[in-house]
Amino acid sequence: MSDPVTPLNNATATGTVTVREIGPLGMITLRAGGDTPGLAEAIQTIAGTGVPVQRSILGQGGRWAAWMSPDEYLLVLPHADVPAALATIATTFGAGHHLAADVSDARSVFRIEGAGADAVIARLCPVDLPGLPDGEIRRTRVAQVACALWRADGGITLVAFRSVARYVFDILANAAR
Amino acid sequence: MTTRLSSGGRLIDRTTAIEFTFNGRRMQGHPGDTLASALLANGQTLVGRSFKYHRPRGIMTSGPEEPNALMNLGSGARFEPNQRATTTPLFDGLESASQNHWPSLDYDIGILNNYAARLLPAGFYYKTFIHPRAFWKHVFEPVIRQSAGLGRAPKDRDADRYDQTYAFCDVLVAGGGIAGLMAARDAATKGQRVILCEQTPHWGGRAPVDCTTIDGRPVQTWIDTTVAALVGMPNVTLLTRCMAAAVHDHGYVLAEEDLTSHAPGTDGPRKRLWRIRAGRIIAASGAIERPIPFAGNDIPGVMLAGAVRDYVVNFGVSPGDRTVVVTTNDSAYLTAIALREAGLAVPVIVDARPIADGDLPNRARAMGIRVETGRAVVKVKGGKHVRSVSLGLMAGEGAVLEEVPCDAVAMSGGWSPVVHLYSHCGGKLLWDEPTQSFVPDPARPPLNHDGTAMVECVGTAKDVHAMCMDRASDVHAPVSIMPQGAGYALRSKMWLDYQNDVKVSDVQLAAQEGYASVEHTKRYTTLGMATDQGKLSNINGLSVLAKALNEPIPAVGTTTFRPPYAPVTLGTLAGEARGEIFQPLRRTPIHEWHTKSGAYMEPVGLWHRPYCFARPGETHAQAVEREVNNTRQALGFLDASTLGKIIVKGPDAGRFLDMLYTGVMSTLPVGKCRYGLMCNEQGFLSDDGVVARISPDTWLCHTTSGGADRIHAWMEDWLQCEWWDWQVYTANVTEQYAQVAIVGPNARKLLENLGGMDVSREALPFMTWADGTLAGFPVRVYRISFSGELSYEVAVPASLGLAFWEACLAAGKDLGAMPYGTEALHVMRAEKGFIMIGDETDGTVIPQDLGLDWAISKKKPDYLGKRGQSRPHLASPDRWKLVGLETLDGSVIPDGAYAVAEGTNANGQRNTEGRVTSTYYSPTLRRGIAMGLIAQGPERMGQTVRFGKLNGGTVEARIVSAVFVDKDGDKQNV
């Protein structure tokens, strides 16, 4: 078997800011109500954080837990740890109503780094960036496709779908020209 | 003649000369000039020809309201038509050319229209070109379009790039004059986030020209201090060369910023569209001066009085040695004073009012300027330039009392607040009699989401009396036309709308012909419909119309103000969306392999999929035939990654799917697959696909490639809005997996070559699935077939998709493996009579039309679409139903052909009894095959029907079963 590959093989573009495709990252979409027994334990075990409240994202480095909608969370973790994490979720929830799916490979992930990162994102995403603090996530669009973004390590992390990775990279690189 | 004065010009840098061209003539100007000021400085007063009568036209204004000086700028890939010279900053090497003349600006053959003006009244085109009907489209319109019109559309791809940016603020201030600066300062000191945008490169608006002090300080000092304070505030964004163009609901404002038009060759985007969400909008957009309707008010040399003093004070440009000033209010006296201070002659100030004894008139008199009140300009004389004006009594009919030789006329019919931004979203206006203008009605502003005022006007955008000079005593004369009793000959030379050539006589004719509504009059006469959108003509036109109708102006009303305020470059609206990034292109994990392998790609939704893999020397048809034959005889691979995959899980998931699909999914055993159909509430077939039961509470639903997002949204719609208490979660995992269809007699051998799991007939029978590994890849294998062959669809994580595809190719070398494209897929499914959503369905077809009754549960009490399908029209036995079609001569029926029946319908069209839905050449049968919907088709097996052909004539086809190949399905079930 081969190693997992990202859609753009970690392409990089440098302009007013640096745009990097990163990954592969592990990602799990977890659908469950905020009060479902097992939710807090599963998130604590996998992401090392509490349950994120509305619009928030908790975590650091390679492990994050994000609030995506009233009954949806996104867990970010190392790619190889996904099967074990899914097993953890199955155990902690037991028969409780939930859905956990591996979406690691359905996504492409970008880092936008440099002093002009906010200006680059402002060209493409209808987001009030001065009003976006650390610890908040925005589900929005980047030009014509869906994305989510948050601040981390002095830059911005942006997640989009895998099939449009090239488009997202190209528009980010164009906005950084 | 206009010329550059020896001194003055606060905005220009006289130490530097820059070169530009106009109609190929080389001219010189200075940094800080606009194209208009530079043309005037070079004595170029004739700058264009009018739209309809091709009359000579000169520069009329100094701002975005300019109707005449529209230029072609640049050339080739930087060509731009209809650019206003008055707002175009001059730069070294600028190329400009005038528009709408032939063969040249000075000798224009279209001027003949001017002498035939009596024959071209309002509504001329409507009245003249109405018969014969077909002539309008094919004869009249093309000829008229050729002779009229302004600039031509660019032919080349734009060499520049454009940018957009989103911004958010508490307060957006549109306009950087005194009122705008004050409003921005007030909001900023309260800590609010402020964006202040100013359309020109300079702050302060008209104040440096019209005023001397503000708050006791010299104007420029006040401006500089205020701007410096704002620059120092982190919560303030200051934008010059940025025009607030449009106000939309919820404080959404579009503004266009010019970044590098004035500095060509600079790296970076040329213009930027700001997409601003503002809590509150302050329109400090100033006021626009009105022309006065007198005969010959369009002859080059006639300008707005405010523009004349702008050119003198800002650019050091003389409008001519002798300027006659004609006015209905005090402000034009400033022009006379400015001209006199610049050493130029003002033979007379013609004031329409019987008395003018305010501060400004008295200052003018004190300077020795002759002031004539109660007088009118009867007529301006001149051809390509003003020679003289004839004066008479304002109250009279046009008898000439005096002839005054002059080179220029400066006119002021008063000022109209720029209420556009207030009105874009529904703010209402009031008529203000003293200033003869519409002003914002503070009681009826456009509203924000919370019912508060979204837009507020300040400064002269609210009330022109806010001008800094003493205007308390300034009452405007309500001048509709000048002189008030002018006869037809004079009225037919009084221009209201310069750009569209609409005269006082045209509006009067419209009123006479029964056009009482201002909106109708506008469209009939084209008043205010040019690129300047009536900025100069609106009030004067209303005033003339009101008088003709014998109504007060407020009763006539005004036309609607629509965005944008002034034309916006289309490139900024497109932003980054051009070339490679015009639209997102969805790529499967195997996409690059396809393109490298020479696949011919076709769009499927936003995906690109291989249509066929043509080899060198092969036509596409030959490639498809090869791919079909190879797959049927050996082994084919299809990249099926685009298939939609949606997980549905929960205690109520089975019940949910039983409602969504026409069949029963809740009884599907774990490990098995079942084909399902989804309909909308009306009963029409919407999507299809294979459903797999993954666990007792989990199903995986496959959708069509184009349907994944739509069906996922459809599921969530029902779960969130209708059945919110059902315990079901869904997840769209379409892109998590690459999916490869391994198809053909050698398919099982290939999987055995890859190795890792039991794929035998016993372990993995038809319509089952299993998890396992193949060649070390973690896979889920579905034993399903869309071709009628032995077939496995293998899903692997997308990050391993390409590697798995390549492993299959390597393992299939000795088994005759070849990739195949979507066309071979379509041909093979058609040979088997399988339907395709979008071919056999078009939103008007129900499953019963397609003979899919076997996939519809009769036992279930309900499913989405069940009730719809019971309506009489859908349940009728006369519906067109799916059958196979075999041409008698073996040819392929044209795509989309209709089956013709005897007779004609009420519209004289041939009756029809069916249509083709899929039609192909079948490589397996070596003949044309088709599927189609035919009236009572299944009951007419063996009969023939005739299909119309594109080149006329018909082709005969026999009605047969839609399953052309392997009718019993033995091949897929081995």
Image (cartoon, coloured by chain):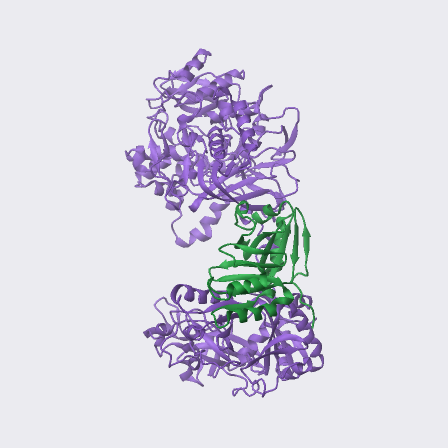
Chain colours: A green, B purple
Residue nearer the viewer, B345 or B115: B345
Could you tell whether B114 is left or right of A58 in the image? left
Most extreme residue toward the left is: B550
In the rendered image, which quarter is residue B102 located in?
A: top right
Q: Nearer the viewer, residue A108 or B108?
A: A108
- Classify B17 as above or below B655: above
The number of callouts visible is: 0
Measured from the top left, where is residue B541 in percent x and y?
37, 34
Q: Residue B549, relative to residue B795: is it above or below? A: above
Residue name at image x 48 percent, y 27 percent: B303
Q: State the image coordinates of residue B67 (x, y, percent, origin top left).
A: 48, 35
The front one of B838 and A35 is: A35
Instruction: State whether residue B943 appears in this view.
Output: yes
Residue situated in front as seen by the camera: B818 or B801: B801
Q: What percent of the width, then of the height, locates residue B117? A: 42, 36
- The quadrant in which the C terminus of chain B is found is bottom right
Q: In which quarter of the image is the N terminus of chain B?
A: top right
Q: Is residue B844 above or below residue A168?
A: below
Q: Can residue B60 be seen in this view?
A: no
Q: Which residue is drawn at 30% across and 41% down?
A: B514
The quarter of the picture where residue B621 lies is bottom right
Q: In this view, does B151 lie above or below B584?
A: above
Image coordinates for residue B535, horizontal then vertical, percent: 44, 35
Residue at image point 56% right, 47% down: A122
Describe residue B475's horizontal placement relative to residue B890 as left or right.
left
